Amino acid sequence: MDAVVAVRDDRSVESITLFGTMDERESTLGFRPQKEIPYNALLPYADQLDAESVYQLADIKAHLARVIQLRDIKVGGVHWCGQLAKYIRMFGLKFSKADHLTFIRLVYELVTIPELDFSLVHKFSQLLITLLKKRELIPREELVIQWRPLHKLLETVVYSPYEHLGLVLFPSNIEQVLKNLIRACRIYFPVEATQEMLDEWRPLLCPFDVKMMQGIFFLEHFLPTVVYPKEHDRSFLLWFEELIGLWQSCSNNPSWEAHLINLFSRVANDRIGFINWEPYLDRIFANILRSFHIPVGSKHVVLATSAHNTIDGIMPLCRWIAAMFGNGSHVQNYLDKLFKALESFYHPSNNGRWSIKLLKFLSGLPLAFVKRVQRERFGKKSWEPDIPVAARLTDDDITRFVNSISPVVFTAMFSKIGSTDSAAALHNLASLRPELVIPPLLEKTYPSLETLTEPHRLIACLQCCVSIARPMLSHAKHYPEGRLHIIPLLSLSLPGIDPNDIKKSLITFQLLSALASLVPIVDCSEAPQNRNDLSEVEIELCSATAQFEDFVLQFFDRAFMLVENSIHQHTRSDSAASDKMSQEEMMLEVCLLSSSISILQQCSTPIYSEALSRLYRFACDSIFEIKVAGKFTADLVRAAIKVRPEIAVKKFIPGLCEKIIQRTTSEDLSQEEHLDNEFLWNLLLLSQAVRCDGSCLVPFKEVLTKVLQLTLHLKCKDAQEWSGTLLRYLLKSLSSIYALDFRCTVTDWDLPLTEYLPIREWGKSGDLFNLGMKWHVPSKEEKAFVEHLLNTFLLTELKRTRSHCDGNSVMTREELLQCIRIVSHCLVGTGACLPHWTRFESVSLIESLVELRRYGNTASCDDDEITLEGENVRVLVSSFMRPLLAHMLLSSEDDTKTLVEIIKVYKLVMYYHGSLKDEFEGRWKNRHSIKHFMENKLQKKKTHIRALLVDRTQLQHELRTVNQAPKVFTVLHRDLFLDLHHLAVSRYMEVRKVAQGALSTGFQMFAYSYRMILDDTIKYLKDDPSIEPHQFKGALYVILGENKRSLVSKRSWEVMNKLWPALVETKHCEKPSVLKVYDEIIDRVDRNIETTELSLTVSDSAVNAAKEIWTNGSLPKPSLPSATNGELETGRAVERERNADNISAYLELVNKLVSSAESGSLGWRFHQVSLEMLTLLIRYDIRFPSSAVRLFVTNMVNSSINVRKICTAGLSAILKLQKRKHKLVEIDPYAVSGAPRPLHSNDIHPGDDRPDNRWLHYRQDGFPKDEEQWNKTVFVEKTHWGYYCWPTKMMVYAPSSEQPPLGRSFEELLDDEKPIYEAFTSKEFVDQLIKFLSLEENKGKDHFHEKNFVLFKGLFRNFDDTVLPCLAPHIERLVADTSHETHETSQRCAAEIISGLIRGSKHWTYTKVVSLWKWLMPLMKIVITNFTVESIADWGTCLATASENRDPLKISPLLELLMDNPLNGDGGSFGDSSRMYLLQGLISQQEWRLPSVLHRLYNYILIHLRHPYKAVRDRLGSTIVSLFLYDINLPNGSPTLSPRRVMFIEHILPLLEPLKDSLVAEAGRNNEAGAVAPDPQRATEGAEVPMEHAPSTEDSSEAMTMKNKENSNNSNDIDSAENSEWKSNINLCKTVLKTLQGIYTRMFQAGMPEMLKLLPVICLLESETKDPELTRECLVTLGCMSQSQMTPELILPTLETIEEVSRLNSWHARVAVLGYLQVMVFNNLFLLQSEAIASRIRGTVVNLMCDEQLEVRELSGVTLGGLLHCGYLKIDDQLMNQFKQLSSTRIKKRSRDEMVPIELMIKRHAGVIGLSACILAFPYQVPDFMPQLLMLISAHLNDPPPIQATVKKTLTSFKRTHLDSWHDHKQKFTDDQLVVLTELLVSPNYYA
């Protein structure tokens, strides 16, 4: 055991990092860092990062701890937690273990602060998840996290009693965040937690109750499963047997099954080797197979249980399967059988609703398997226990797994849904065993590459080849031949670049990029002559590399062809899109560029030079349009220069510059609006040619500057665009830091082959320790060039704007626009090297007790700042732009294009520092997806290809670039914001839109910056004539914001106090566009508002945790001292003051909105909005002001239905808020029952028949007789308590005498209760309210309104019967209403009130309860006589809702009323079925606590099973199932006291026996008739029929009809008594069938041996043609029975019953049982694996092949084929010989009129059917025996009709299913066989 616990040395974390040894790091930093981001060490300025990180860490520690000590959580806490999260993203976990633990404890305390705002919980939880993510760094013994606070958080969110009423509003994804947090924390729960959790949640495990879902949900998420072996007996062993037994017992898809599956999957994965799964494999794989809902059989029935697939997640199943391998497990055998059964459903021709899930399973299973292999063999060091050696996967396990799944993957890769999942599966399989996976894939790929007729196959093959690119090269040891396929694949895939097939072109580019990025494209063909250390494969590979140059040149030829065929005029003539590329063209451009770079950067110098020369000739000799073809060509030039700028720049830039300069100097182009394509072509190519290493551009400083001077101010718009692009990219290339070398290795590929052999680097992973990063860092010359360009262009243009403003040199609008664009290009190009300004004073945006400091991050190698005239460039640009903007607003406000460009300059000045956050995030995600396809999980971490490692390092630099500015909001920011705000309300929409977007970006970048413009925005909302409509609309859009970021949903009482009343009181505008914006704002409030804290009190434990920052002794020391006692006290005082201010602001806001609503000056829309806002302000933690309550009450009778709905919901929430706290008392259920307490809490005996829970059962005479008895009775309202076990502390409501007093007078009421009391005791108000509530809203669509029920429930709960006198007359009137026009709405209203009344009387005194029932019972009697078709559903909901969570004794009068002869005939069948429906709803809510009532009802129903009306029978069947729901055998449980299915079966079997006998007898008579041939002279046994007139369905039916007529003529009509008895028996059958359907779809345990006794009757009745309803019910019932999951005790009885039915006289019964058999076997495939069972099933099917009835023979063949197809039965020699012998039965040829002996015909036909079944069992394959079988059955093509038809059908089906892959299948046939098949399958030509 100790060996298992010990951590393996070979998985230890490397003590040497990229930064040096850990000892060196400790010496440098002062602490030993937990885990640094290694890519920081590769940055060119890495030497500056240690000092920066130490400074930031010391500051973060101090401020974060102090902000908690000073109790400033919302502002300061969020800020400094954000700084810590940012620090982790920048530097990793670069702090000591002591600090790490301190941070975890500190943030945990923040998360679990009582009553913390859930928005803050959301933020703190994400930080805590980040801190806990690397769990290998912190062993369990060093950290303990308590689970109860987390449970309370999750329970509050998921099962909140307030959320549905709107009393609390959670963040949108808070549930998922908390789940992720618990997942990260549960590993550190104390070992005692498991028992505590079981004690807490076991009492909820009542399978029939909704609480079961809650209990299993918590168990799934909280139970810890990562423990040491010595702790097993205190962890999963406490619950494993119990829960898996529960799962096995409830086998019929319970709704909570998915949670158990997830739990079992997790414990299997975490405890590999410690759990024996062998006893459960049958059930596990049976459930997996059933979860796919595969249709089987010709009469497939979709069950209700299939509608909701409980096993939703595929990955838990995949992890579960992968975790069960090893240690001699038989999982692989089961997996083989599973894929054998599913294989044909993966075929492209077999598509359906199951396909997506099957494909996800196919891709998920290899991934889970690979992860396990990686964990066992390449996992990193961890304190977690290793998997025992005996349980680890062996090489043989891996091989068997790959061989098992590979054929299915190759079948699925051509799926109509797509090949993405198959590609993912192949990627992982190839990582495991490339030699088994790659060759078959290539065998499919090469033919696809050579044909043009199947592009879908080619695309699928290429996509899969992309996924196996790296495995093909990574396994030189196991699969050395893989490298030999690279060059053929590269060459053969080039024709895939097809301008006419974009999809094929895109996937071809992906393949070329993937393969090229893995191999140096170097000609090594001379190596065999110079080296003698090469293997045979290497020699062959070296020779093949001679083709590399041809491949590269051919690639560019294809690219050139693509360019030529992408000319803009050829692609489309749509003038509206003339300036833009289509989506397909943009995708093609990206792929072309990526592939070109990938190929060229891998080329050796000779090959590159050849490619460059060809590209140069094409670019210089060709001239196309510049919109599409020009961009494609420019991308090719960009790729070539980017890869080798030292070579390519000299080739392109001088020539292009010379052409441009020559053209512009020889001609005056300045005023030309349209320039020819030649000039634009050269300018476009030059703009992309400068996107390379800036150092190579310095020599061309003068010519580039001259080109810019000559072209920037041309009048031609295209020339301006590309000249500006040239300036932008030139500056970016010169001034930015970026990686230069992305090759797959760092070695110089031009070395002699004797020194270096590139082919040995193919597919090699990059080495972080030897990555050879090459950076472009701006040199002094480059910076000088940049300053020169800025002085020449930026400064010049800025000065021109000054002159323009002064009037000295006025520019035209076009000139001014180009001037601003040049400024914009300069800022974009130099954004990375332009520091932010620091000389301006910062602006305080919000108050905090600590400094809200933000840190910039180093992203450059020196501090040399590029300036203009000694001034910060950003400040200088701002100083010129602001006056220009002011000038334009005065003189040319309609110049929208220039104003939009100025706004862009503002954005660049404030926000842009080389990369935008959104662009960076996009590149980050793109890299992640590429990494996913290119990674090899079966290696250690960071072993990606070098290009990915370099790219990741580049992204690390970009991340620092994005965050290099400190984001301090200064005075200049404020001024720029105010300018933007002014533009945001501009007269012109184009300007407003861009300015609003700029403001939204600023709000995100600078926290709380929206406060600077809030007052100015609100100013435009006032009803002031001076405010123009465009200002009003602009202000609304500023408030609306972007996405979910809206000012109106800010969690600040100050902001809401300003903004919400302003929105309500704003001026009215009926302009549709304005109203649309206004409605969007209000909708944004409804959807995005979150509950904002009123009172936030930081816990003392959080303050104490903050002190650890100073006491843990870790360096660096916090930069500030701990808070003094005085500061602590100040923090408490400020906290109290803040809470008081919040409450005051809340009340002020409510009062403002109430005043506005009551003012009478608001329009209907704004009045409704005010009420909606008030509804959002109703909270669970503070009582609502009485003025607001009065407003809601008053508007309950508003004429607007929307207002009434709002007020109903609001008042319901207020009543919940006003609910008085009811006293709870603890009871001892064992003392109450007198039963002994179990010795241990784990001694569980679930069920309803235990001595300790029988006292909860309902007793008919149990209703208390007086007040004293009422108060002594223990009422348990929740139905789940006591069934499974009792809680540790059982709490119930105290007697009503101890509850808060009811019947309060008006004076005793609180102020907020009085308005409600006054209204509902006012006759006028109640009359008006009921009038509105009983109105029809949507004709024919209205239903029981839950909100109305909640309203009345709250009324009667809070005010007891004091509000009943005014409502009672209305209830009586509504109940009695039977008028045609109003009865539906009247009764619905009455139902809502009565349900609320019954539920609201929960805590009434005995006297009031008795009075209530005395008054209510006569009304209920009227109800059960007056309901109608329209109202019955509402009354059903009413009674079910009324009895929910109520002790059955409290609703005893209602229960007994409904139990009183419900089938009395009043109202006919509708009345009977409706009363039963009401009763069923009532008793279902009480679940297991009504055994006596259920028995009474059961005995009553037995009398009416033969009811003549269908509606009643259907309801009786459903009700019987409700009685049987509790008949369940749980582990260690006892039989139920409620009715059981056995009783029912035993009762009805004797009743059905006469019917069965009569059916068998009738079948016998029909068989005699069916044996009669059409020739009336032949009627004896063994008769012969002519060969042309073999028995058929029509013949049999006709014969039976003749026989029936004869019998009818020879005897009198059946007398009425017999007919009546027949109908009565049929009605009984229909009721029983409905019951069986319910049992198999609704019950947790469906099947039982006794129920199989009904199968013969059902099979006999299934063909009853006289009653279509009976036939349909039998069909559905057989479907339910066959699809149910069997248990071991059911197997033998099932087989015996099937054999019994197969021997019945009725051929219809035999047909029915064959359909049942096929579906039953498939759905229970893994439970019927015994050889004896399979032999019996095969014998039954084969025997039925020789049946005298044609239909039976044919269906038996289909059944056999299905059983062979799914792999259940095997084709062995015995079976084959039997069929061959039968098919060879000789039939002597006689004359045409002679008969053929029918026995011989049947035998021969049976043999042919058997052979056909063997053929059709393989619809997409050709096994070795199939050619011979096809020859055998083809010999029967001229046999008599039934045989001939079978052969033709078989051959036709074979042709149809094998046609798609016939080019592969025909290889299995000999030439002679192919000739025969061709003659049989190909129709003869008419002209032959």
Image (cartoon, rainbow, N blue to C red):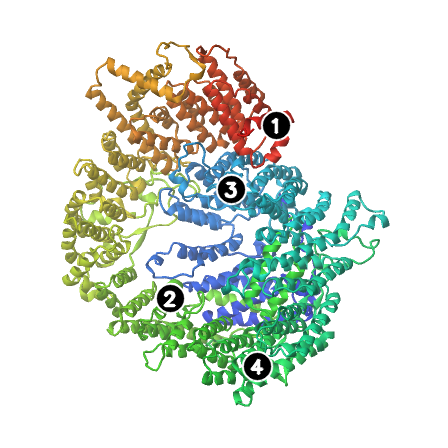
* Residue depicted at x 53% and y 54%: 188
Neighbor class of circle 2 (other Cα within 10 Å; few <14, some 14-19, many 20+) is: some
Q: Quadrant of residue 92?
A: bottom right
Of the residues shown, which amino acid type is indicated by label 1? Leu
User: Is mark 2 in CB contact (under 8 Å) with mark 3?
Assistant: no
Q: Give the percent coordinates (x, y) of residue 1311.
A: 24, 68
Local secondary structure at mark 3: helix
Local secondary structure at mark 2: helix
Instruction: Decide: is 1555 above or below 1309.
Output: above
Lower sequence index among marks 2 and 3: 3
User: Marks 4 and 2, Cα distance to the nearest angstrom?
Assistant: 37 Å
- The residue identified by callout 4 is 877
Of the residues shown, which amino acid type is indicated by label 2? Glu
* Residue depicted at x 44% and y 18%: 1747
Q: Give the percent coordinates (x, y) of residue 244.
A: 47, 39
Q: Is residue 276 left or right of residue 250?
A: right
